[in-house]
Amino acid sequence: MNALTRPAVFVQPPPRLENLYLSDRLLVGLLRRKLPPDLYARLEAEFIELGALAAGPLAEQQRADRHNEPVLTQWDPWGNRVDSIELSPLWREAERVAVRFGLTAVPYERREAEWSRLRQFALVYLFHPVTDVYTCPLAMTDGAARTLLDSGNRALIDRAVPHLTHREPAQFWTSGQWMTESVGGSDVGRSDAVAEPGPDGVWRLYGKKWFTSAATSQMALTLARPAGNGPGGQGLAMFYVECRDATGQLDGIRVERLKDKLGTRKVPTAELTLDGTPARLVAGASGGTRAIEPMLKITRTWNSIAAAAFMRHGHRLAADYAMRRVAFGAPLAAQPLHRATLADLEAECAGAMLLAFQQAELLGREEAGVLDEDGVALLRLLTPLVKLVTGKQAVAAVSEAIEAFGGAGYVEDTGLPLLLRDTHVLPIWEGTTNVLSLDLLLRADVVRGVAALGRRIDAAVAGVGAGTSLAAAAAAAGAALRRAAAWLRAAGDADTRQAEARRFALTLGRCFELALLVEHAQALAPGADRAAVENLAQRFRRSGIDLLADDR
Ligand SMILES: Cc1cc2nc3c(=O)[nH]c(=O)nc-3n(C[C@H](O)[C@H](O)[C@H](O)COP(=O)(O)OP(=O)(O)OC[C@H]3O[C@@H](n4cnc5c(N)ncnc54)[C@H](O)[C@@H]3O)c2cc1C
């Protein structure tokens, strides 16, 4: 065959990444809307810098790091138990970047007052998709700082918080959160690790922690039952552990093995045996499940931002690919059904993103002491709600993004399967969908929370004129909220209500996402960006808001 008759070599065009910040019109629009203009002007360069780093060097390193995983070495050549864990190069770089951008420092420096969490989570949103879930230890580190500060334990605050929020890599610590035992993660009150008191306020912990993701951390917050305490969560106490002794050896801790997981494979999730681990009480010798709640508020917010970030990443890759991949004589982006599929996907991404950032905004306002009573009730409702709704959306959305690549999406060295596997943890850890739905339904203040949400939704859709393109979306959000509130008020037997708890929670979350889309569209100046968000709101309305409706 000569060169003229040989068929042309076919090469599929890979998706390309543009600056993750500048190419994200929704994020730019949201931050411009939420941050005061002078503050936005000060922060913009930082967002652009991280957006460029994420789209360029970090994404490249992520691709190069594909085969690397943490390695546990339990014994040295001379028979000493060492249990050292070597992290992947990407993770070591991710830590440097995280510390440089202050991903756990920003909310505690609080230079942006009530907007500090928005700054932080905008950075996290850009960082997350290309760092193979290094956000897991960061979330727990942030959560530990918040929990220690809320505990009021001065000695531990002074000892640990400066490290957890440091901007120098050599001084920076991460923290683990060791709650799950084999008897239960959700049912944490069954934990059977025990704590024995010792001299000088140092306790000794004994037991097995079944999932501990930040196994290389310098410290951890954990739960154990002080000897003689009663059963259940109330009988547990929260302890502070420094994992290594002065010589750098693990102190009364054995790493039995690393979990062989579906995803998050860069995360060194270990099974630990605590065998006389020195520990200090953080906030009294009981009530540990309550004392550790601030940790969950923070980690669930990180989870929600991570979910939205993975969704956006899947969509941006699929949208870019659709411009290049030709099928049936035209780029995919020109095929009406593929375009509609991507637009529906984008609507889910936008709803999840606005909801996750709403949670971040409220958290920042609470920490700055400027949240009113309604806001406090709303934040309490949203913390489990936003996590469960976005976690569920993320798996579906990323799965759709993978399908948008056809066969290429299923091939490992495109990096796309990794995205789906890593996303799949988001509905599981930090509380599963069912457990959080029940947590929401059975909490004493749910009625107040739903009332506060109703007022927030009314405010979000106020001003939408009858007959405008947003009218149907505004009406659908309000109607779904009213049905959920009526369902909550209605009497019913406990089992039936529990069985419906997930539909109740998802309805609340989806109608709020729709209302936030309407609110955002209205806030934008007339033009292409506004028209795009109006279109997303209309699409979102048609993709199922009211999951309690009789005809579902
Ligand atoms: C990769 C990874 C890393 C992790 N890292 C950590 C870590 O660092 N620290 C830590 O403490 N934990 C960690 N975990 C544990 C995680 O938080 C728990 O696995 C999770 O909370 C679920 O608990 P479980 O495994 O006990 O599941 P179960 O509670 O046994 O739940 C099993 C299923 O039953 C459902 N279910 C449970 N109770 C009810 C109910 N009453 N009604 C209806 N449905 C119900 C759940 O929704 C779930 O679908 C990690 C998990 C994973 C996968």
Image (spheres, grey):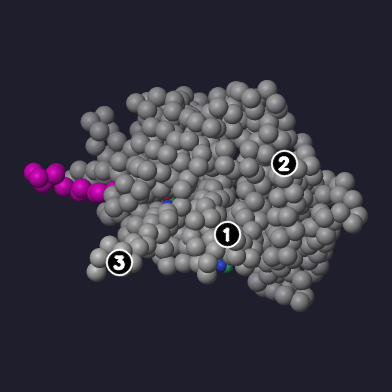
Marks 2/3: CA distance? 69 Å
Residue 365, quarter of picture? top right
- Horizontally, residue 547 falls left or right of residue 405, namely right
Residue occupying image coordinates x 61% and y 23%: 42
Q: Please report the bounds of the magenta region as a residue range.
A: 70-80
Camera sees residue 135: no
Q: Position of residue 480 (x, y in %)?
A: 78, 62
Residue under label 2: 376
The residue located at (37%, 28%) in the rendering is: 169
- Of labels 3 and 1, earlier in sequence is 3
Disc 1 residue type (three-letter) = Ala
Q: Earlier in the sequence, mark 2 or mark 1?
A: 1
Q: Residues within 10 Å of mark 3 (few under 14, many from 20)?
A: few
Name the residue nearer the viewer: 95 or 332. Answer: 332
Side (left or right) of 102 relative to 7:
right
Tag 2 near tag 3, CB within 8 Å: no
Q: Looking at the rendering, in which quadrant would you find the C terminus?
A: bottom right
Mark 3, residue position: 6
- Kind of residue sitting beneath label 3: Arg
Nearer the N terminus, badge 2 or badge 3? 3
The image position of residue 214, as x and y in percent, is 38, 45
Q: Residue at x 38, y 32 (%)?
A: 96
Q: Nearer the viewer, residue 46 or 23?
A: 23
Whether 373 is drawn above or below 68: the answer is above
Q: In this view of the protein, can residue 132 be seen by the observer?
A: yes
Pick out the residue farthest to the left.
Answer: 78
CA distance for labels 3 and 1:
30 Å
For residue 430, the mark is: none
Amino acid type at mark 2 = Val
> Is 193 inside the magenta-drawn segment?
no
Would you name the residue on which mark 1 appears? Answer: 333
